[in-house]
Structures are given as C-alpha cells and as structure tokens.
C-alpha cells in the first residue's frame, strides 16, 4: 500500500483538506436533520477508517519475527540527521511518507468527533496518541520489517489535530450558514405593518 504516497502532491493535499472540510459541513447539517441515524453512520465510518489504518500500518512487509527491533526514540531524527544526507528522490519520498502518515489520521479524527460530539480537541488528540502508540508497539512486537519511530506518533497526532480543527471549522461554518438562513426567513415572514392592515379594513 506504500504506492499511495506516489500520488501525494501539494494540489492533492489541498483538495483533500477542502474535501474533508466539505464533509464536516455536510455531516453537521445531516446530523441536525437525522440525529441518531447520522450518529450511527459516523460510528460505522469510524470503524471503517480504523480498520483501514490498522491494515495499512500493521500489514507485514516481511515474515513476522524476521526483522530487527530498532526503535527511533529521538524526535525529528529522520528530518534533522538523515534529511541532509538524502538525495532529492529520497527527500521527496520522505516528505510524502510523513504527509501520508498525517493524512491517514484525518478521517479517523473527523469520524471520531462526529461519533462522540462531546469530545473536544484534547480527547481527540489523546485518543489519536493512544492509537498511534498501540500501532508502534504492535509493530515492535511483530518485527515484520517496519521501523518503530517516535516521529510516526508525532505526525499521526498532528494529522488527528488537523482533522479535529477541520471538524470544528466545519461545524462553525454550517451553524453560521444555518443561522443566516433562519434570520433571513424570519425577516421574510415578518407581519405587515399595522397601517397596512388598517388601510385594508377601510
């Protein structure tokens, strides 16, 4: 599944963020109309995206137990120490991989917020951190060709934070848009002035 990162470009990233924002706006509107049904749909999507995330991160790239148990615990090690020694293609792939790691947690965070509307940014970040640590710990136990890296946790949490912020922005935009419509509707339905009524009576 690593081939997905080949399609990551700045334009695709922008379109992806806008698409997530539109989903948040639409989801907020749908939740106001459907209520419980929208909540169950969000929970189904949460399970779906969790499954995709676990499949993408825990699928062995070699036989289980055949790899080493290397753990990179220095934050920014790949960026600060290895980036300068990389060639142009390696740098491009490294950046795309980090963007993909962040993007993977975007829909998870958004569907989590829709599934649990009372959870705030802090709860979402903590849940994303717990999920990412679980993934890294499982990769360490499996030793199946994946490197355990603290940067993956940081990038995953950054992606989840971005998803939670997009959710908040989408809710605000949907609420503001609905409020403006309701205000305009009230103005259109305003009663006629009293002088107009008295004129009709005469």
Image (cartoon, helix red, strand yellow):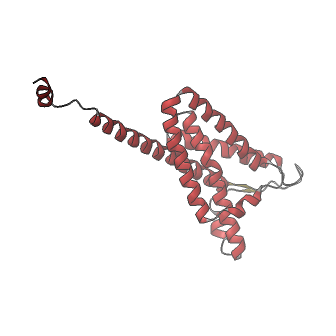
Count of marks placed on residues: 0
Above/below status of 37 relative to 67: above
Q: Would you place residue 37 above or below residue 55 in this image? A: above
Image quarter for residue 81? Answer: bottom right
Left or right position of 161 against 141: left
Instruction: Give me the residue at 48% from left, 37% from top.
Output: 29
* Location of residue 159 in the rendering, given as x and y in whole percent from the top left corner: 59, 52
Whether residue 66 appears in this view of the structure is yes
Residue 86 in view of the camera = no
Pick out the residue farthest to the front: 202
Q: Residue at x 55, y 33 (%)?
A: 116
Rendered location of residue 135, percent (x, y): 72, 46
- Tell me the quadrant of the picture where the C terminus can be found: top left
x 58%, y 48%: residue: 160
Q: Give the x, y percent position of residue 96.
A: 67, 63
Q: In which quarter of the image is the N terminus?
A: bottom right
As drawn, the residue found furthest toward the top would be 201
Foreground pick, 175 / 47: 175
- Identify the residue at image location x=31%, y=39%: 184
Tell me: 104 left or right of 172: right
The part of the image, by quadrant, that contains residue 86 is bottom right
**Where residue 79 appears, x then y in whole percent?**
64, 66
């Amino acid at each position: 599944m690593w081939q997905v990162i080949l399609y990551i470009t700045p334009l695709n990233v922008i379109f992806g963020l806008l698409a997530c924002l539109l989903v948040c706006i639409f989801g907020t509107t749908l939740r106001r109309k459907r209520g419980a049904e929208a909540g169950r749909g969000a929970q189904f999507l949460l399970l779906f995206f969790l499954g995709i995330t676990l499949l993408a991160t825990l699928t062995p790239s070699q036989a289980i137990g055949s790899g080493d148990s290397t753990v990179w615990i220095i934050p920014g090690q790949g960026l600060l120490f290895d980036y300068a020694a990389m060639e142009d293609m390696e740098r491009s792939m490294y950046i795309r991989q980090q963007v993909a790691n962040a993007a993977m947690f975007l829909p998870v965070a958004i569907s989590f917020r829709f599934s649990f509307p009372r959870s705030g940014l802090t709860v979402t970040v903590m849940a994303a951190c717990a999920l990412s640590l679980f993934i890294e710990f499982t990769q360490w136990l499996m030793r199946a060709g994946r490197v355990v890296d603290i940067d993956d946790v940081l990038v995953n949490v950054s992606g989840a934070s971005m998803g939670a912020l997009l959710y908040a922005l989408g809710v605000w935009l949907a609420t503001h848009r609905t409020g403006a419509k309701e205000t305009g509707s009230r103005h259109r339905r305003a009663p006629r002035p009293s002088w107009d009524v008295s004129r009709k009576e005469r």
